[in-house]
Image: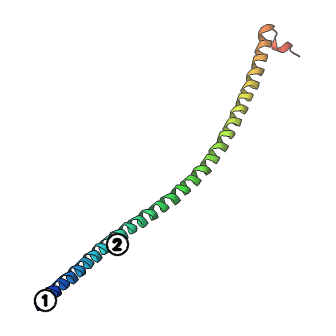
Amino acid sequence: MVYQARKLFQACDSIERLTRNNEKQHLDTWHKQEKKVRELWAKCQKANSKLREEILFLKKENETYREMEGHFKALYEENKALKENLENLQKATSGGAEAESANNSSSPVDPRQRP
């Protein structure tokens, strides 16, 4: 009976030690996983912060682009209007010169005799 009691005690002691070791291993594993999760979270936060900075930079660049686009459109319209004015002036100038040369070539008149 004492022998069986001793064996039972040893078995209980072994089970208790195994349980503590298992719990310790489980806690160690959990702590390691928790540490990895925290490290990954920190990396994600850092990457997120960089992305936010990049987004802000791109928004500013986009605003600058839109402003420049407006300036370029205005310059384009102004250039277009100036070209039209130049063409009209050239037409008016060349039209007057053509009319004058047509008058000169059609009738040879002494310039002193013109009215």
Tell me where residue 93 appears, x and y as whole percent. Answer: 75, 25
Say if 95 sits above or below 18 in the image.
Answer: above
Q: How is the image coloured?
A: rainbow
Near mark 1 (Cα within 10 A), the count class, few <14, some 14-19 or many ≥20, is few
Spatial CA span between label 1 and label 2: 41 Å
As drawn, is 78 to the left or to the right of 5?
right
For image coordinates 72% across by 26% down, the residue present is 90
Tell me where residue 67 appears, x and y as whole percent. Answer: 62, 51
Q: What residue type is labelled 1?
A: Arg
Quadrant for the C terminus, please.
top right
As drawn, is 55 to the left or to the right of 39?
right
As drawn, is 55 to the left or to the right of 18?
right
Query: Residue 47 sits in which quadrant?
Result: bottom left
The residue under label 1 is 6
Quadrant for the N terminus, please.
bottom left
- Between circles 1 and 2, the one closer to the viewer is 1
Tell me where residue 15 appears, x and y as whole percent. Answer: 21, 81
Tell me where residue 69 appears, x and y as whole percent. Answer: 61, 46
Q: What element carries label 2?
A: helix
Near mark 2 (Cα within 10 A), the count class, few <14, some 14-19 or many ≥20, is few
Say if 113 sits above or below 54 in the image.
Answer: above
Say if 31 sits above or below 82 in the image.
Answer: below
Q: What element carries label 1?
A: helix
- Most extreme residue toward the left, as rendered? 3
Q: Which of 35 and 113 is in front in this view?
A: 35
Q: Which amino acid does label 2 sit on?
A: Glu
For image coordinates 76% across by 25% down, the residue present is 92
For image coordinates 20% across by 84% down, the residue present is 12
Sequence-wise first label, 1 or 2: 1
Q: Which of 71 and 29 is in front in this view?
A: 29
The residue under label 2 is 34
Q: Nearer the viewer, residue 98 or 7?
A: 7
